[in-house]
Image (spheres, helix red, strand yellow):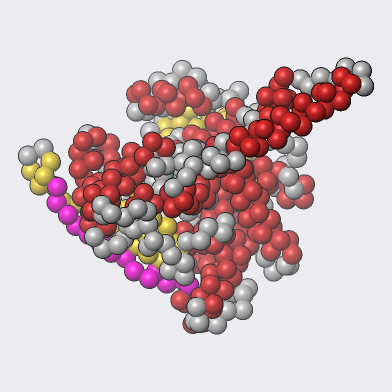
Amino acid sequence: MKIAGEPSFRDSVDLMFNRATALMDLSPGLQQKIQVCNSTYTVRFGVRLRGKIETFTGYRSVHSEHMEPVKGGIRYALSVNQDEVEALAALMTYKCALVETPFGGSKGGLCIDPRAWEENELEQITRRFAYELIKRDLIHPAQNVPAPDMGTGAREMAWIADQYARMNTSDINGKACVTGKPPHAGGIQGRVEATGRGVQYAIHEFFRHEDDKALAKLSGGVEGKRVIVQGLGNVGYHAAKFLSEEDGAVITAVIEHDGAIINDKGVAIEELRQWITKTGSVKGFSGGEYVIDGAAVLEKDCDILIPAAMEGVINLTNAARISCKLLVEAANGPVTYGADEILRKKGVIIIPDMYANAGGVTVSYFEWVKNLSHIRFGRMQRRAEESRHILLVNELEKLSADKGLGWTMSPNFKDKYLKGAGELELVRSGLDDTMRSAYQAMREVWHGRNDVEDLRVAAYIVSISRVAAAYQSKGL
Ligand code: NAD
């Protein structure tokens, strides 16, 4: 989305990159090498649908190959264009470096309104797009591994994996050509929720640091905090659901493409999601007040604002009126370069996209490793762990009985403690650890240097240093 009078999304990412590199000691040559997008492939292909040939335009952009495979989602939207795909590919490079997933950055997109096509038509289109990318190694387990993004999900990833298998019948690692697949088609438990779960873990980590909360003029925990979420798709739905149902946050408004639902007592996220699935709209939902001007609801007073829909929604036209304390960028690029400056001056703390929404790529990394190792996480250890715990509990209970102490463990504790970790528990633990470590790496730069004003610049500095080190070790 290009906003009048503002840099394009790609330029906005570059300007943010420049803010960071101005504080770093990189040679101009290396700086340029990291910043440029290595290549963008544009493909136009035809599919016979409803009795006529429809031509579609798609992109796959590779931003940086300092590590391979490169990684990044495939977006389906009418607004997809080269500038956007390149901006998103660049963000993938920095994101992967920040959360230490061993990938370069890439992104893909198809100009299409997915709502305008039937499922079988979408399958034909997706398979044809995948065919075009696979035959150029732009989808490949060792070179380029897509994942879902806006407008795509597990279903599309399963079609892509199957298309790759048809074209590479003897590739034993073929399933690792794409992540975000359904569990029954080589996926991993916890991938669908991963980006929203990562947003929740990012907020938890922020709330662990009293001085960071103080900077945002927040205190206490997540419970009772007033949260506004824009976009109730994959990312926004899971983030809103976990924050409200597990942490006790109050979702005071949900903004969707056709309006918003406001309820100061809290929007019931599961019910609203079901309503949207049934009707395609937030309109008519009885659990809150419907407002047609969704954009205006972004400006409503709240503690935490979570834009989880698309880029550029907070820009020069509305930044001055945004009145949250903490802004968590669950979407990619929701705040433009100009808006970022205004919000910083206002004292709004921004948890930047490359960190806040990195849960998706983190769990994608686990899925890729699972596919390459051909075994489910926890399969070998789970029961061994369980037996050791049973041994310990039995021994403690026996000692208590022998000494006549009468101690017993509550069934609830025993249930929780005895259970060995399965795939979902391990995925969540790996994700939580990743989100904590990455926040701490950013925070060290943010508070450790007096020339670093905000978390975004800190995130860029951490990422760019790691990418620079990877290039330097290759002799560049
Ligand atoms: P999605 O297609 O599942 O959901 C997007 C939602 O936003 C939809 O419900 C849509 O109706 C709504 N929407 C669209 N335009 C809107 C507008 N103008 N105002 C309010 N709502 C609007 O997409 P997603 O996968 O949840 O992705 C959302 C954002 O998160 C994107 O920026 C994407 O790049 C980013 N992201 C996604 C993932 C992932 O794993 N899916 C990972 C990292 C980042």
Residue 433: horizontal and vertical position, in percent? 64, 48
Residue 166: horizontal and vertical position, in percent? 23, 49
Q: Residue at x 76, y 28 (%)?
A: 393
Residue 451 shows in the view:
yes
38 above or below 304? below
Residue 155: horizontal and vertical position, in percent? 33, 38
Q: Along the horizontal axis of the image, is 114 left or right of 179?
A: left
Judge whether residue 28 is colored magenta: no
Viewer-closest of 295 and 397: 397
The answer to which image quadrant residue 423 occupies is top right
Q: Residue at x 45, y 35 (%)?
A: 232
Judge whether residue 39 is colored magenta: yes
The answer to which image quadrant residue 448 occupies is bottom right
Q: Along the horizontal axis of the image, is 32 left or right of 25?
A: left
397 above or below 223? above
Quick one: which residue is furthest to the left in this view? 51
Q: Residue at x 92, y 18 (%)?
A: 404
Viewer-closest of 105 and 295: 105
Magenta segment range? 34-47
Residue 259: horizontal and vertical position, in percent? 42, 32
Residue 318 shows in the view:
no
The answer to which image quadrant residue 136 occupies is bottom left
232 above or below 285? below
Count of numbered circles on the image:
0
- State ligand 1's quadrant: top left
Q: Main secondary structure of the magenta part?
A: strand
Q: Residue at x 63, y 37 (%)?
A: 384
